[in-house]
Amino acid sequence: MIDVEDLSVHFGGVVSLDQMTIQFPEGACGLIGPNGAGKTTFFNVLSGFVTPRSGRVVAMGQDLLSMPDYKRARWGLRRTFQTEQAIEKLTVFDNVATVYEHSTRSGKAGRSAAVEAALEFVGLTDVAQQTVRALGAKERRFIEVARAVVGSPKLILLDEPAAGLPDAETALLGGIIRSIPERVGATVILVDHDMSLVQACCDWTAVLDFGRLLASGPTAEVLRDRNVMRAYLGTEEVA
Amino acid sequence: MTAVVSTPASSAPPAHLPLLARITTNRLFEPVVVVVVLLVGLFAIPSFFDSYWIANFTQLAVFSIVCASAGLLYGRVGLVSLGQVASYGIGCWVTMRLAFATTLPYPVLLVIGGLVAAVIGVMIGLPALRVSGLYLALVTLMLAAGMEIVLERTGFPNGGTGFKGVVTTISDIKATRRPSFAGTDVAYYRFIVVGAFVMFMLASYVLSRKPGRAWASIRQSEAAALAAGIDVTRYKLWAFALAAFMAGVAGGLYAGSVPKGMSIDAFNRQSAIFLIAVVIMGGIYSLWGGLLGAFFATCLLKYLTQNVFGHQFWTRFALSLFGFGLLANLIQNTRIAERKGVEA
Ligand SMILES: Nc1ncnc2c1ncn2[C@@H]1O[C@H](COP(=O)(O)OP(=O)(O)OP(=O)(O)O)[C@@H](O)[C@H]1O
Ligand SMILES: [Mg+2]
């Protein structure tokens, strides 16, 4: 469980997160909201890239914000980025191996097995030895997910992992994300604008708007919420 | 990002590729080229060129290490450092001082010179860690200028006593000793080629391991590297240490190639800027770029001055062109880095 208490982030005059208080249950959780709602900012706080003005985040009993940024991966935090960040110059295998070797203590032992398992989980075994530069958008997005599940993560943050993917591939990715809690044993927070993806992956969803928590609860209920519909597009229909 | 089309999965190159592409993508291609270049360096060049050109190739071999070290920092880690010439100077000074003061074998002197340069390189790296791109270039340029001032005061050891080891009468000036097995110019040239080979192998080994992968992550995005658990500060310092070690060893190799009385010209600010310019020209990603950059800086430049431009002026003009290229490149990279920072 991820316990967020009174989290506020200000950038100059902009209030990106406004006293956010929420408890994410275990499993796959959605985090949605219009552009500029503060979703990425929330992830950046968890990653340690942004220092909040106030607030606490306790994840599985661990006070996350007191840990140095690079040590959070070793604790079990993983994330993907809104602009995909698979490492161009490395092979697919090395991309995943890099995360493994820096976020676990086990060193070389078990590295290959862990990396291969992660690649198999996302279906990239065939391109393991190819350089990322030569690969397309789909592979890059899937590499990021493989990087997120390798080792023994506890909490995985996915920031619009399906952005730019066609529907069929998004559906494939959705199936993979949905199975993370059970197969990897980690809690997932999924940020996406694609409501069908969020619906397919997450039983529970929270909504941010202008840095404030608008609603949270079972995904189907949250998406029917009037306030949520108004926040999106100002209409009653959520895509 | 290119097409959304996914590439078919296959590890071996397809058979219908043109012959040349099939050769260059072969796993054995690079090792074979390395061996050929090494053999050409060791045997073909000494038998085809006179002593004037051997001196130039000697410089090339030394400089290739310095270029590779700067290219490694810039191309592999994303750090534009103008401090590599300072490390080169430190390695040269330490090796010379110990060569006069001790009877240690020359390779040992080289390692000590490299290690001292590495320690100082890390100290240079520490204040530079907070900045990147153009700003890092400026900070390290200031450090290079500081190094130049220090070297102006101390001079290079030439057989004297005391800490500086500088003699006062010209007739007492001694050349740095060479290894017993590499006394002649040609033999010493070969010694340098072997030294450069060892440094390139060291760099290539480290690049293929955990630090190389960490550097590739850092270069692409520091935020993504931190999120992957990489201790970015530590790996940047490690890069500064390796690069300074390489440049320091190069300085030590250079020490024995200079007949009598080392001038500080090779280690001043202009050299620092010139170095990064030729490194960018040679290509920063591949270690081969170091060799190419050094070729531009030594043999090609001599050749152009002598046979094409006919005058130093035009050679210098060509240099300014490199300089402009460098500046444009730096500014662009700084912008990209800033944009990345916002997006992450
Ligand atoms: N580093 C920063 N400096 C200044 N303002 C920032 C910074 N990061 C985010 N913001 C501001 O904070 C607000 C929230 O941005 P954030 O990126 O978290 O939104 P988001 O919910 O991820 O939106 P999107 O769906 O478009 O990705 C925006 O107004 C944004 O301009
Ligand atoms: Mg965002």
Image (spheres, coloured by chain):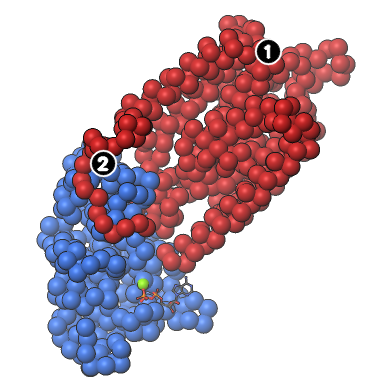
Residue positioned 79% across, 33% down in the render: B311
Mark 1 crowdedness (10 Å alpha carbons): few <14, some 14-19, many ≥20:
few
Kindly indicate the quadrant of the structure image that contains residue A85.
Answer: bottom left
Whether residue A86 is situated above or below residue B255 in the rendered picture: below
* Marking on residue A93: none
Q: Which residue is drawn at 43% across and 45% down?
A: B215
Chain A is which colour?
blue
Labels 1, 2: one chain:
no
Which chain is disc 2 placed on? A
Q: Nearer the viewer, residue B47 or A46?
A: B47
On the rendered structure, is B237 left or right of B299? left
Element type where label 1 sits in the image: helix
**Point 19% across, 85% down: residue:** A223
Q: Distance between the residues labelled 1 and 2?
A: 47 Å
The percent coordinates of residue B140 (x first, y second) are 64, 46
Compared to residue A83, the image places residue B255 above or below, namely above
The label shown at residue A129 is: 2
Residue at 23% from the left image edge and 67% from the top image edge: A166
Dot 2 lies on which element? Answer: loop
Q: Residue B51 carries which label?
A: 1
Q: Color used for chain B?
A: red
Residues tagged 1 and 2 counted as in contact (Cβ below 8 A) = no
Above or below for A176 versus A218: above
Amino acid type shown at disc 1: Ser
Residue B39 image point, x, y percent: 48, 15
Locate residue A34, reporting x and y percent.
Answer: 33, 82
**Residue A236 shows in the view:** yes
| Image region (quadrant) for ligand 2 | bottom left
